[in-house]
Amino acid sequence: MKIIKLLFFTALFATVCFACQSNENGTTSSNEEIDMSNIDFSNIENLHAQPLPVIQKCVEGKWKCIQIITYGFVGIHYPSNAFVNIKNDSVAVTGDDCFIQANSFSYSWEKKETSLDYTTYVMEDIGWFFDKIRNDTLAVVWDGARVGEYSPTCLFIRIK
């Protein structure tokens, strides 16, 4: 009888341990390291669908704002001197362009439904989320600043 109880509790313990290793989707725990060795950080078409560590790695660094698409009557603007430095928990904007004001602020990440009808990680205090990267050009969407049916989008090019 003692051996049956021991086997039962051993099996129960093993089940609990294995259940803690995966989330509700059956994928590995978020605490597990993501292998980023094979990721091309200059081209990710579905950046918005990536895990947070991949998004963070892709967007960190220095960027030059090359285009702002606001739709509506303003249309497209090409900043001449606007730069963004995205760090682990802060963003610094520099330059003297009238559409981008120099500023520095901190942010936190939150996973939520966006104006483009998908769920992704948003820089909560800023309202930015990242749609894709093509040839080191990052598409940034301002989620909280909708103009009619559109959310303004900015294109940043990586400064190497």
Image: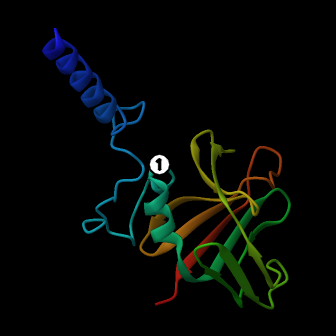
Which residue in the rendered view is the most extreme toward the top?
A: 1
Q: Quadrant of the N terminus?
A: top left
x%, y% of residue 11?
22, 23
Count of all numbered marks drawn on residues in the image: 1
**Is residue 99 left or right of 92 when viewed as pictured?**
right
- Whole-percent x and y of residue 65? 65, 80
* 6 over 106 or under it: above or below: above
Point 45% across, 75% down: residue? 136
Above or below: residue 93 compared with residue 22: below
Is 22 or 145 nearer to us in this picture?
A: 22
Q: Which residue is mark 1?
A: 49
Residue 58, how many percent across, how many down?
46, 69
Q: Residue at x 79, y 79 (%)?
A: 100
Position of residue 13 relative to residue 55, above or below, is above
In this rendering, position of residue 34 left or right of residue 95 = left
Tell me where residue 109 appears, x and y as whole percent: 63, 57
Q: For the residue marked with disc 1, what is the amino acid?
A: Ala
- Judged from the image, the secondary structure of the residue bearing numbered disc 1 is helix
